[in-house]
Amino acid sequence: MRILLVNKFHYLKGGSEKYYFDLAKLLKEHGHEVAFFSMKDEKNIKTDCKEYFVENSDMNSKNIFKALDVIYSKKNKKAMEKALNDFKPDIVHLNNFQRQLSASIIKPIKKRYIPIVFTAHDLQAICPAIVMLDREKNICDECKNGKYINCVKKKCVKNSSLKSLLGAIEGKYYRSKKIYSKQIDRIITPSEFYKKELEEDEIKPEKIVALHNFIDMDDYNVKIEDEGYAFYFGRIIKEKGVLNLIKAFKDIKYHKLYIAGDGPDIEKVKKYIKNNKLENQIKLLGFLNSDQVKEYVRKARFIVVPSVWYENCPYSVLETLAMGKPIIGSNLGGIPELVKNNETGLIYKYDNINELIDKMKVLFENKDKAEELGKTAKKTAKENFSKEAYYNKIIKIYEGVMKDVK
């Protein structure tokens, strides 16, 4: 089978890119031919596959006509036509294509009756700001069912009237052209929660398949230890709930929290730690590479995922489970699908700091329970998130959609 993988970034920017490259590797291991379609960038990763690149673009341009390219780019449409004529794929698998690549790339694919699968790594199909948060970073679903005027009123996209208007126009265009509801043949959501959200936005349930992401279990076959600390790794930003986690430590004595990562709220975090004299308990590690993160996870008592927004299927959770460590996670989005309460970790109500404190105390004070949850976590990861299990499911999706289109 010849599969054209599409993603606007061709370097490891986030979860979508990790999936894009990992899926290519998995498909190639099973004898399929893979090509990439993305944007030019000096950070791009060179692969041994065919690669098709378009010029880098985004909605930050001060030229309104260039900014409108994020909605429909004639140049990208032509580039896709050339890629299709050259590679002749059996199927096109879209990942993050909106904005930079634009909906224009859909038309030449449909014209050739090539099946389109789309993995929804976020909720841009519903929310022009993508994350279902307003500009104050509070959960918001006011744009559901095409009510994009709310995005403009609240200036949800980077607190900019123009960018919010462009996001709303883009949303209206995608809806009017039925990009998600008709032109894409199958949508994969990496969580049941995202599937439900898209269904509530008037996309037919039979078009959507919930399928959690996968990892290579061999990469996480490590010898675990327990040095007794809690660990958070990720962006230091409001929606990740890091400030809630730090506030919780005001009421936890004699235990330590290590935080790895950087982000726009790092100064707020530092200030809170200093003002509340938490320097002896909370250690900020800054940005760590993946091997360094793995080492801290390996020696932690448990990991905390305190998100206050709708997470999808975070790789941080999958990787932690695969290493056999329990997770304390908030009850939002796809997290409770991965972290089973009292089986692979503990779940708390996302805005209830007292409940978070109680859950952490349970594992700080009960090493045996943490170990038991960790063992179940590793077993669960092997059974549900392995690359072998994923391959069998993704191929069935490809074969099914090819049969439907033909």
Image (cartoon, helix red, strand yellow):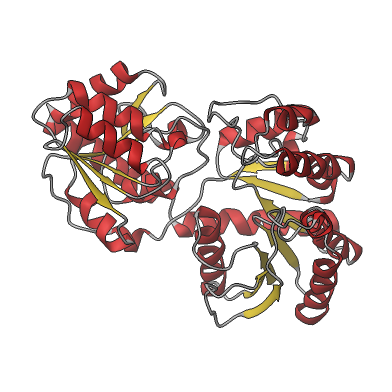
Observer-nearest of 94 and 157: 157
Residue extending farthest to the front is 62
Evaluate whether residue 241 shows in this view: yes
Task: Tell me the quarter of the picture where residue 391 sits.
Answer: bottom right
Q: Position of residue 360 (x, y in %)?
A: 23, 27
Q: Position of residue 196 (x, y in %)?
A: 64, 30
The quadrant of the rendering that contains the C terminus is: bottom right
Q: Position of 137 compared to 36: left or right?
A: left
Observer-nearest of 15 and 140: 140
Q: How many marks?
A: 0
Observer-nearest of 362 and 221: 362
Observer-nearest of 219 and 97: 97
Q: Tell me which residue sits at (61%, 33%) in the image.
A: 132
Task: Tell me the quarter of the picture where residue 42 sits.
Answer: bottom right
Q: Position of 210 compared to 178: left or right?
A: left
Q: Does residue 61 lie above or below 247 as drawn? A: below
The quadrant of the rendering that contains the N terminus is: bottom right
Q: Position of residue 119 (x, y in %)?
A: 64, 51
Q: Does residue 154 lie above or below 286 as drawn? A: above
Evaluate whether residue 343 shows in this view: no
Q: Position of residue 357 (x, y in %)?
A: 25, 22
Q: Tell me which residue sits at (63%, 59%) in the image.
A: 395
